[in-house]
Amino acid sequence: MKILNIMLCPKLGGIQQVFCDYDLALRLQNIHTLNIVHPFAKIKKELRKNKANLKYLFNVNQYDPVAVLQLKHKIKNYAPDVIIVHGNRAATLARKATKKSKIPIIAVCHNKKIKRLIGVNALFIILEALRKNALELGQPPKTSYYIPNMIQLEKNAKFTPRKFHKTVVIGTLGRLVEEKALDVLLDALAILKSQNIPFKVLIPGTGKLEVELRIQTQNLGLEKEVEFIGWISNKKSFSNNPPKQ
């Protein structure tokens, strides 16, 4: 079996991580996988580190006619049995490029932006609530699958309970955008502080709400408890080596 795995957003975030996870998971099953990304994609470094089979597709937007033709050519040359798409841009361009083809398309639904994914041959959805939205929008139940995000574990990995710090350290992982609800987290932390409960919170990542969240942190008087640490590339190191208290 040959699978074409497409993700065309050049930024970094959860979609990009899931895209890489699918590539690794498929190859672990001895499935030949070709990944297509934007030439400026920041995820290229991780894909190369994982020795992924990689091709590039420059595109201006999801309506780019040149990108459609180029993708059609890549699909013809690779002749995949299945195409997996991540994100609306990849889904739209793939559907245009396979308009006269019978190659099935599987879309992985990562967030609420789901309308352009409706009608694909199968929809993999990371949350049950999103699956309900897909059904309401017309995706047939038999082609809608609730499949949570996967994580890569080391071979023979064992869970070892860790002792909490005297001051509990809380970490988040995600872009600083509205759907992550970090403003709600900050409001909750203000309640903890009002009850004299000691804590430290580390917020990595970047996003359009970063300035607003920093201002909210100051307004709530949480400057000493909350630290914005920017984008992190080594998630394992972040979780295994929290700051000493």
Image (spheres, rainbow, N blue to C red):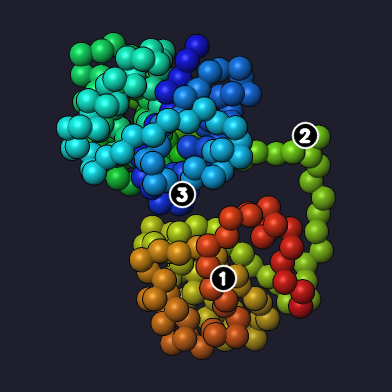
Q: Which marked residue is nearer to the observer: mark 1 or mark 3?
A: 3
Please state which of residues 17 and 116 is positioned toward the viewer in this rendering. 17
Residue 155: which numbered mark, if any?
Answer: 2
Q: Position of residue 193 (x, y in %)?
A: 59, 83
Secondary structure under badge 1?
strand
The amino acid type found where label 1 is placed reads Ile
Q: Which badge, 1 or 2, comes first in the chain's sequence?
A: 2
Picture layout, residue 217 above or below residue 210 = below
Secondary structure under badge 2?
loop
Picture layout, residue 58 above or below residue 104 = below
Q: Position of residue 19 (x, y in %)?
A: 48, 37
Marks 1 and 3: CB-CB under 8 Å? no
Q: Is residue 70 left or right of residue 39?
A: left
Q: Residue 153 is drawn in which quadrant?
A: top right
Residue 133: which numbered mark, if any?
Answer: none
Can residue 86 be seen in this snapshot?
no
The residue identified by callout 1 is: 229
Residue at image point 19% right, 37% down? 64
Marks 3 and 2: CB-CB under 8 Å? no
How far apart, in angstroms, are the residues tagged by discs 1 and 3?
19 Å
The residue identified by callout 3 is: 42
Residue at image point 40% right, 27% down? 84
Please state which of residues 189 and 107 is positioned toward the viewer in this rendering. 107
Q: Which marked residue is nearer to the observer: mark 3 or mark 2?
A: 3
